């Protein structure tokens, strides 16, 4: 029986989408990335498109239980009790019993000092596992971002400025663009956003704000190199006076104070930012409703 034109077109579209999805899968993309690339938001259809194609290795989460089981068995071989293993690994007693019940029971009791040393070692191992899990989650999240489109960078920059930049008040008109932050990543992202908007670097002026007891010359060199600007583009550094009654926590080699970025002749740019931000505010509830349907 011949297919009707509608069915033929639908089948052809599916096969075409499947071919694209398989090609993207073999390039190493996750389901989320394929979904965004092909604009396919139906999970059932998405799974059918990549059926039979294995997921990339980087998307596979390691089996944490296997790792904990091996750690529990190793600790039991070292003479740890169920209570010690349970406390060190954060597992249930039933899991510990299941994993190590075939191993011999410890023959001797340790001194309090030995027990404390073992517990400390177990806690350090637990912290190491936690740190690895934190890094894994962050790395996975970083990979899922991928390249930013110009529109995405624009929206990120608007939100970034409205969170950290100077804003106009009805009682204090300041329609100029001024951004302050201590995070180098925030600074470089903000500068990339200004580049996207066509703001010439010659219109930028910088000010370092830092505690007077810190390494002021080092901080000035650091910020100058980060933004790629000559010292002539920097205003005089603003020093915060030391209060002997307070204990400073912002110390060490990584403390470089804050950097202020001011855009000259930026009233129109400020108005564009403010208008764009309120456009995001109005559109956000509608986007949330679309995600729920």
Image (cartoon, helix red, strand yellow):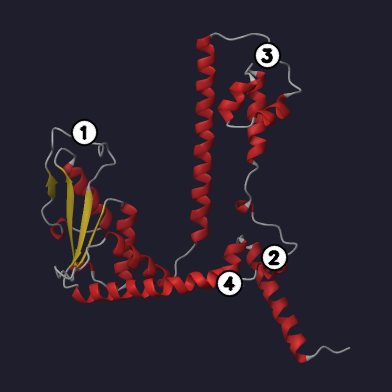
Total number of numbered discs in the rendering: 4
Q: Which mark is residue 247?
A: 1
User: Secondary structure under badge 3?
Assistant: loop
What residue sits right under mark 3 in the picture? 106
Instruction: Locate residue 278, reporting x and y percent.
Output: 33, 73
Crowding at label 2, few (<14), some or many (≥20) Cα neighbours within 10 Å? some
Q: Nearer the viewer, mark 3 or mark 4?
A: 4
What residue sits right under mark 4 in the picture? 293
Give the mark nearest the N terminus, 2 or 1: 2
- Residue nearest the viewer, comparing 51 with 232: 51
For the residues marked 2 and 1, what is the alpha-carbon distance in whole angstroms? 56 Å
Give the mark nearest the N terminus, 3 or 1: 3
Q: Quadrant of residue 108?
A: top right
Give the mark nearest the N terminus, 1 or 4: 1
Query: Residue lying furthest right in this view?
Result: 1
Give the mark nearest the N terminus, 4 or 2: 2
Q: Is residue 95 left or right of residue 124?
A: right
- Residue nearest the viewer, comparing 157 with 169: 169
Q: Nearer the viewer, mark 4 or mark 2?
A: 4
Q: Which mark is residue 47?
A: 2
């Amino acid at each position: 029986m011949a297919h009707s034109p509608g069915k033929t077109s639908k089948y052809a579209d599916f096969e075409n989408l499947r071919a694209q999805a398989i090609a993207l899968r073999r390039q190493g993309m996750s389901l989320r990335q394929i979904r965004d690339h092909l604009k396919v938001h139906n999970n059932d259809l998405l799974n059918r498109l990549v059926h039979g194609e294995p997921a990339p290795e980087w998307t596979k989460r390691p089996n944490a239980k296997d790792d904990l089981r091996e750690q529990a068995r190793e600790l039991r071989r070292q003479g740890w009790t169920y209570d010690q293993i349970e406390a060190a690994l954060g597992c249930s007693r039933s899991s510990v019993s299941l994993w190590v019940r075939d191993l011999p029971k410890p023959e001797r009791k340790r001194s309090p000092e030995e027990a404390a040393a073992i517990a400390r070692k177990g806690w350090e191992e637990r912290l190491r596992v936690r740190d690895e899990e934190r890094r894994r989650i962050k790395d996975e999240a970083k990979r899922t971002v991928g390249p930013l489109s110009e529109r995405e960078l624009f929206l990120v920059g608007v939100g970034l400025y409205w969170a950290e930049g100077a804003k106009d008040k009805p009682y204090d008109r300041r329609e100029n663009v001024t951004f302050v932050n201590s995070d180098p990543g925030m600074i470089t992202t903000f500068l990339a956003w200004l580049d996207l908007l066509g703001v010439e670097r010659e219109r930028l002026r910088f000010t370092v704000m830092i505690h007077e007891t810190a390494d002021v010359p080092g901080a000035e060199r650091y910020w100058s190199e980060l933004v790629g600007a000559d010292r002539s583009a920097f205003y005089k550094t603003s020093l915060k006076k030391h209060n002997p009654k307070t204990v400073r926590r912002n110390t060490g080699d990584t403390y470089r104070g804050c950097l202020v970025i001011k855009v000259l002749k930026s009233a129109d740019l400020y108005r564009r930012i403010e208008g764009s931000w309120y456009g995001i505010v109005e559109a956000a509830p509608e986007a949330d409703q679309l995600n729920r349907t």
